[in-house]
């Protein structure tokens, strides 16, 4: 029901190419991230973004964001919190702030 995308500048195109555009809503997150959710089953309650990390040399591409959204299931009324994040480079380093940076800065 939910999809998190990283390094994706156009989730609408991905969904169209996959034949899913009419079934999924799109929440752009900046930093080439996005959340897709099944429109039939979920109502978007709110969403947000924050910069939570920065890449480290020698693989510096910039800052990295986290995005989140809360949804209510239309039939059951239950809520869900969904988060999406593209981690900083180098992979496994935590970026400029080290391993605790992204986790500690995520709202």
Image (cartoon, rainbow, N blue to C red):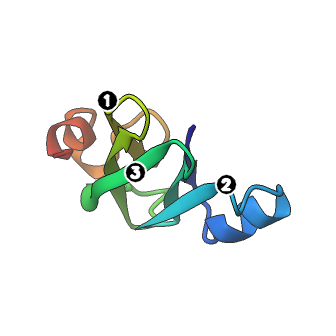
The residue at 33%/34% (across/down) is 80
- The secondary element bearing badge 2 is classed as loop
Q: Is residue 93 visible?
A: yes
In percent of the image, x 71 and y 63: which residue is there?
Answer: 21
Report x, y in % for residue 45.
28, 53
Q: Above or below — where is 38 with respect to 25?
A: above
Res 43 label: 3
Left or right of 18, for residue 70:
left
Mark 1 lies on a secondary structure that is loop
Q: Residue at (47%, 56%) from the top-left corner?
A: 58
Q: State the image coordinates of residue 81 (x, y, percent, origin top left).
A: 31, 37
Q: Which residue in the protein does label 2 denote? A: 23
Task: Give how far across and how far down residue 42 sits, in percent.
Answer: 45, 45
Occupied quadrant, residue 13: bottom right
Q: Residues within 10 Å of mark 2 (few under 14, many from 20)?
A: some
Seen from the viewer's position, the closer of residues 44 and 84 is 44
Which residue matches tag 1?
78
Position above or below: 12 against 84? below
Q: Which mark is residue 7?
A: none
Residue 67 appears in view: no
Nearer the N terminus, badge 2 or badge 3?
2
Q: Nearer the viewer, residue 60 or 58?
A: 60
- Nearest to N terminus: mark 3 or mark 1: 3
Q: Which of the 4 image quadrants contains residue 102?
A: top left
In whole angstroms, how far apart are the C-alphas of marks 2 and 3?
13 Å
């Amino acid at each position: 029901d939910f999809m998190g995308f990283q390094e994706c500048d156009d989730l609408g195109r991905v969904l169209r190419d996959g034949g899913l555009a009419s079934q999924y809503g799109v929440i752009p997150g900046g930093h080439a991230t996005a959340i897709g959710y099944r429109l039939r089953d979920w109502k978007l309650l709110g969403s947000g973004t924050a910069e939570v990390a920065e890449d480290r040399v020698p693989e510096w591409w910039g800052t990295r964001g986290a995005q989140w959204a809360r949804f209510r299931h239309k039939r059951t009324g239950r809520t869900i919190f969904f988060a999406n994040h593209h981690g900083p480079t180098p992979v496994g380093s935590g970026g400029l702030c080290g391993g605790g940076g992204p986790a500690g800065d995520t709202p």
